[in-house]
């Protein structure tokens, strides 16, 4: 949803014609550099978007004109495709207004203002009107506060609007996140940065692209006050700045980084500086660091200038590139990183090589050659940085903050309680001739967007059944943030299925507007304007659409630098796009013409369906493929050490070598190997099989095997999970002589349910680490049910949101008991730490005598698998 509200023409004219002779950018050299960059972009895009690039000449106010020029000079294509002049002028004007009206605005240097206040874009979300809509409300909220107090208060406001919930990779806009009152960390931080920028507090989203000690990543917020950057957890208020549940994990990070929009001249550590943005390394704010230098040589010992070195971190069973740096004339490059293990992969486009960098290494050498694939099977241990304790917060401050958190939860819940209060799913279903259960489920899933979805169904008339099929074939997030008008476009312009077309194929690959990670948009209308003879040729032979796109669309690797996909109509408008947006455009075009199309499972390559089979699409410049594919079959030969069944992106992945680098094939997260037993077709080539096993401490035992697949070959691929040496129990015992009190008040002696062992879990409902744990355990419900022991989930009423209801926690083992631990009295009996010193959630697995066999604290992905391994052993 592109949340852009059209402002009245008289208001826009007033903005454009307001007069101010003072410069926003006083530094002449900086102003000239930005103006030169603006002219360069205008030469490229000014003809197609003359309305945008010509608007600067219509603005009399010098400050506003310079702000608009800065935004246009560095705007990614995804914004250029949809921004209109009134939107750009209104947002720039509001940003300048906040700088003039907020008491700390005059203390914000212009370069900080340009990079971290003026841009509406935070990362890869879609644009909206959040700044112009909420500036006044936020300004009133912080009236009378100093800048630091205002930043913390803004975060409390954000907490009242949004809570954490895992979601897909598409980043909702701030207004869409508010609408559903939920978001993953990337959406919470985008929302909070937008709120801080609205009141002229410089802010940016920072993130660790992958953790070293556990799977996954995390994003949070840095904000600038009086010359220094501070941090906070987005929508997760703490009583003081520079604290969050992630403080301890961040001390084990290998990289924390952010992007500065536009020209950047600051003095922070730069990873790479591009024409349109700068990537900044902020790890030193959180962790102990070292400089890790890489030197690249060829087999003759000659240093390789221009070689690329990837600093790769094991996570999600793949080696993820934290950074790729170009070697200088000495064949060297350097990254500020943490004290953990990295795989350094170097290449010059043809030759490659790799080496492990240990936690203590400060310089490594990589020799590249064309024979790296002959490297034998390797098995090695990867270590994350060691955990570092961090001082706690004053308990009284925590108590007061918990009270404020409960108040914020109550405000948010009051809004959530209004959903569907003014409509009846049963009535809508009856009028449309639909099943009430179907309509109720769709409306409930749409959350705050229920009116749009209800209006779409009601407006479909006799085609209400087809409307629900559209809704059934989009994502949950699409239901939560897609306007009725967009859905109506896909209904009104849905092609008739060809005779004999399979309904499931039609619904998923023609009718559905969901293609990849793009914003849903009304693309079918856009394609109606193409010449009929052209579209008819595409229907007859979809490969002709490939040739047309090659000619009509220019591909760029640099102009869409935030990697937000262009909507298909935007590609058609600009006639320039990144390759991913081009691929989405092809699929959208095919579906609009009634041709089943998709991005293929695994390689995510465009395909169209014709004559009963899928056909790969190869655009100009892309490597061709053999007519004869190779095949692999995954075979589970892991030793039975008590672990759960191997899963893709949890224990193993496969990656294809492309120009000397490996790209992981996307078969989905958590797919069990038993669901991958069929022969999988692949292009012939070189592949890397990565297999890993992470232990309680976060260390990983991993193996890497290189595979050469030839045309027609049918290769069995054995997946053998590496074993760790037997690990000792936690080394302490607790008393099970404790009476549990359920949330509803029922009593149960703990020792009466612990005969087969018991898992004690202290949780903070609503907090992200707890939510991850409550996702991990249900994924293994069948295995835990087979064990037959009990899970006891304990909460402290003072740390529990007001709307917490254990019945809303789904998928827990059949033997689950939800209890309270007032004042954490039971937790205080656990040896080792005081309750206030512990990281949440706390997990203990005890045998029937109270001996602790497994313990875990704090944020961790995969706790369920580690726990199951201990139970089975």
Image (cartoon, rainbow, N blue to C red):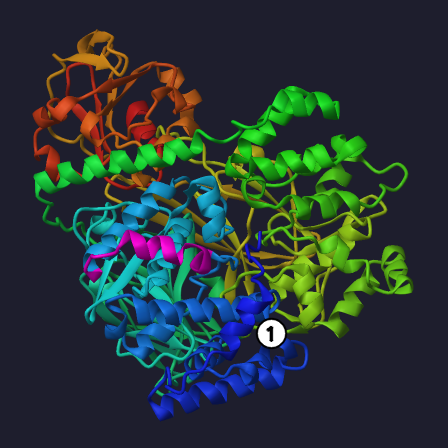
Q: Is residue 801 left or right of residue 835?
A: right
| Residue 72 location (% of width, % of height) | 52, 77
115 is higher (above) or lower (below) than 4? below
Residue 671 lies in the magenta stretch: no
Q: Is residue 480 above or below residue 705?
A: above
Q: Which residue is mark 1?
A: 556
Disc 1 secondary structure class: loop
Query: Which residue: 41% across, 56% down?
Result: 319
Residue 396 visible in the snapshot: yes
As rendered, which of 187 and 727 lies closer to the eye? Answer: 187
Residue in view at x 27 percent, y 56 percent: 253
Q: Chief secondary structure of the magenta span?
A: helix
Seen from the viewer's position, the closer of residues 764 and 176 is 176
Q: The magenta stretch spans which residues? A: 130-147
Location of residue 755 in the rendering, given as x and y in whole percent from the top left corner: 23, 10
Q: Quick check: 319 left or right of 557? A: left
Res 274 quadrant in image:
bottom left
Q: How many marks?
A: 1
Vertical order, 781 against 447 (above or below) = above
- Say left or right for 372 vs 627: left
- Left or right of 699? Residue 373 is right
Q: Is residue 313 visible?
A: no
Q: Quadrant of residue 202?
A: bottom left
Residue 716 at x, y = what percent? Answer: 58, 43
x and y percentages locating residue 187 in the rendered image: 42, 50
């Amino acid at each position: 949803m592109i949340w852009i509200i059209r402002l009245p023409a008289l208001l826009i004219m007033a903005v454009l014609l307001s007069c101010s002779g003072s410069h926003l950018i006083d530094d002449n050299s900086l102003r000239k550099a930005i103006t030169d960059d603006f002219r360069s972009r205008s030469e490229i895009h000014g003809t197609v978007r003359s309305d945008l690039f010509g608007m600067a000449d219509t603005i009399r106010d010098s400050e506003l004109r310079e702000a608009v020029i800065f935004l246009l000079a560095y705007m990614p294509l995804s914004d250029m495709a949809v921004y209109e002049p009134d939107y750009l002028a209104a947002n720039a004007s509001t940003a300048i207004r906040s700088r003039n009206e907020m008491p700390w605005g005059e203390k914000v240097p212009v370069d900080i203002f340009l990079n971290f206040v003026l841009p509406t874009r935070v990362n890869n979300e879609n644009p909206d009107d959040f700044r112009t809509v909420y500036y006044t409300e936020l300004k009133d909220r912080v009236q009378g506060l100093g800048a630091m107090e205002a930043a913390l208060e803004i975060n409390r406001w954000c907490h009242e609007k949004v809570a954490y919930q895992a979601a897909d990779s598409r980043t909702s806009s701030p207004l869409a996140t508010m609408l559903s009152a939920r978001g993953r960390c990337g959406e919470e931080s985008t929302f909070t940065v937008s709120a801080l920028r609205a009141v002229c507090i410089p802010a940016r989203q920072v993130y660790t692209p992958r953790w070293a000690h556990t799977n996954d990543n995390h994003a949070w917020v840095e904000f600038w006050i009086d010359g220094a950057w501070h941090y906070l957890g987005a929508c997760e208020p703490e009583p003081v700045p520079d604290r969050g549940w992630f403080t301890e994990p961040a001390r084990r990070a290998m990289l924390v980084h952010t992007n500065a929009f536009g020209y950047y001249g600051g003095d922070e550590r730069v990873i790479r500086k591009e024409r349109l943005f700068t990537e900044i390394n902020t790890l030193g704010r959180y962790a102990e660091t070292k400089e890790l230098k890489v030197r690249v040589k060829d087999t003759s010992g000659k240093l390789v200038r221009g070689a690329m070195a990837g600093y790769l971190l094991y996570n999600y069973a793949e080696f993820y590139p934290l950074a790729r740096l170009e070697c200088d004339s000495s064949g060297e490059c350097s990254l500020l990183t943490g004290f953990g293990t990295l795989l350094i992969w170097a290449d010059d486009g043809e030759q490659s090589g790799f080496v492990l960098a240990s936690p203590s290494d400060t310089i490594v050498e990589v020799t590249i050659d064309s024979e790296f694939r002959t490297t034998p099977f390797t098995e090695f241990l990867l270590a994350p940085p060691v955990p570092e304790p961090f001082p706690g917060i004053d308990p009284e401050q925590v108590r007061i903050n918990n009270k404020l958190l409960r108040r914020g939860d109550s405000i948010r819940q009051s809004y959530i309680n209004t959903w569907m209060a003014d409509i009846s799913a049963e009535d809508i279903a009856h009028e449309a001739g639909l099943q009430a259960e179907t309509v109720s489920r769709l409306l409930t899933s749409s959350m705050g967007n229920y009116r749009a979805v209800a209006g779409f169904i009601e407006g479909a008339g006799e085609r209400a059944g087809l409307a629900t099929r559209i809704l059934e074939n989009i994502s949950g997030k699409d239901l939560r943030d897609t306007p009725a008008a967009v859905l109506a476009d896909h209904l009104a312009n849905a092609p008739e299925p060809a005779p004999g077309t399979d309904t499931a194929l039609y619904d998923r690959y023609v009718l559905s507007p969901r293609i990849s990670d793009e914003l849903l948009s009304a693309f079918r209308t856009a394609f109606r304007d193409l010449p009929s003879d052209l579209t008819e040729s595409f229907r007859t032979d979809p490969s002709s659409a490939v040739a047309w796109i090659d000619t009509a669309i220019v591909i760029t690797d640099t102009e869409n630098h935030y990697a937000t996909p262009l909507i298909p109509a935007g590609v058609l408008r600009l006639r320039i796009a990144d390759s991913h947006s081009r691929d989405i455009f092809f699929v959208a075009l095919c579906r609009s013409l009634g041709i089943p199309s998709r991005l293929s499972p695994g390689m995510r390559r465009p395909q169209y369906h014709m004559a009963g089979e899928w056909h790969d699409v190869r655009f100009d410049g892309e490597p061709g493929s053999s007519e004869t594919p190779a095949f692999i079959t995954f075979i589970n030969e892991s030793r039975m050490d008590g672990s759960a069944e191997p899963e893709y992106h949890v224990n193993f992945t496969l990656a294809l070598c492309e120009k000397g680098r490996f790209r992981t094939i996307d078969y989905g997260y958590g797919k069990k190997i038993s669901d991958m037993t069929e022969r999988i077709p692949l292009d012939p080539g070189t592949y890397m099989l990565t297999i890993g096993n992470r232990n309680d401490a976060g260390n990983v035992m991993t193996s890497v095997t290189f595979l050469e697949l030839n045309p027609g070959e049918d290769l069995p691929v054995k997946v053998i999970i590496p074993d760790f040496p037997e690990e000792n129990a936690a080394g302490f015992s607790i008393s099970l002589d404790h009476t549990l009190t359920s949330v509803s008040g029922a009593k149960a002696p703990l020792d009466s349910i612990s005969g087969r062992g018991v898992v004690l879990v202290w949780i903070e409902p609503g907090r992200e680490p707890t939510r991850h744990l409550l996702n991990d355990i249900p994924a293994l419900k069948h295995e835990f049910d087979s064990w037959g022991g009990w899970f006891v989930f304990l909460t402290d009423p003072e740390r529990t949101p007001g709307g917490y209801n254990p019945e809303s926690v789904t998928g827990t083992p059949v033997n689950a008991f939800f209890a309270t631990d007032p004042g954490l009295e039971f937790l205080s009996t656990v040896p080792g730490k005081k309750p206030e010193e512990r990281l949440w959630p706390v997990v203990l697995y005890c045998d029937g005598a109270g001996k602790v066999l497994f313990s875990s604290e704090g944020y961790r992905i995969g706790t369920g698998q580690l726990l199951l391994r201990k139970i089975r052993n």
